Amino acid sequence: MRFLRHVERNRILIFIVGAGLEMEPAEQYRTVRDEVMAYKPDLEELDEIVVLSKADLIDEEEKKTILETLPERTMVISAVTGLGMDEFLRRIAASIRRLRNADK
């Protein structure tokens, strides 16, 4: 669990799960999130962004099926095609601005 020590300094948790891998995206998400929360349960209070990556590897039907197993506002991106990357960066920037404004 030493590798999780750095997570304590974060104010936003970004979980990126991959399509087209051996482990299903929902299982990837639950596994990592459960480990993070077991390490420090109060991290539950942080902003959380969930991202389905490698969207270029799956068709629309599979994407829809996968998204039904992930949190409601899960974003879809592909670094290869650029799909969703601008929106992903905007969501991160909006979260940072909101957190900074809350600190004032």
Image (tube, grey):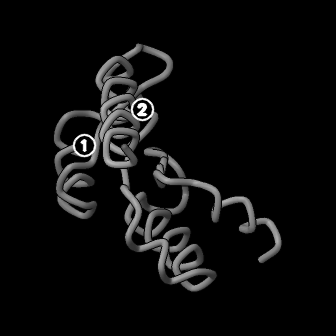
Name the residue nearer the viewer: 81 or 11: 11
Q: Quadrant of the C terminus?
A: top left
Q: What residue sits 48% from the left and 47% below the top?
A: 16
Q: Amino acid at mark 1?
A: Lys
Which numbered tag is attached to residue 57? Answer: 2
Of labels 2 and 1, earlier in sequence is 2
Q: Amino acid at mark 2?
A: Leu
- How many marks on residues? 2
Q: What residue sits 40% from the left and 39% below the top?
A: 100
The x, y position of residue 66, in whole percent, is 27, 54
Find the distance from the CA under tag 2 to the CA under tag 1: 10 Å
Q: Taking 98 as reference, is 7 above or below it?
A: below
Q: Taking 7 as reference, is 80 above or below it?
A: above
Q: Which residue is mark 1?
A: 63
The x, y position of residue 39, in whole percent, is 63, 81
Q: Are marks 2 and 1 in contact (CB under 8 Å)?
A: no
Q: Quadrant of residue 62?
A: top left
In the displayed structure, does residue 85 sit left or right of residue 71?
right
Q: Quadrant of residue 61?
A: top left
Q: Secondary structure at mark 1?
A: helix
Name the residue nearer the viewer: 69 or 86: 86
Q: Quadrant of residue 27?
A: bottom left
Q: Quadrant of the N terminus?
A: bottom right
The x, y position of residue 87, in whole percent, is 29, 24
Which numbered tag is attached to residue 55? Answer: none
Q: Secondary structure at mark 2?
A: helix
Name the residue nearer the viewer: 57 or 103: 103
Q: Residue furthest front?
A: 104
Name the residue nearer the viewer: 54 or 61: 54
| Mark 1 Cα shell of 10 Å, populated few (<14), some (14-19), many (≥20) | some
In the displayed structure, does residue 73 sit left or right of residue 57?
left
Q: What residue sits 49% from the left and 53% below the top?
A: 11
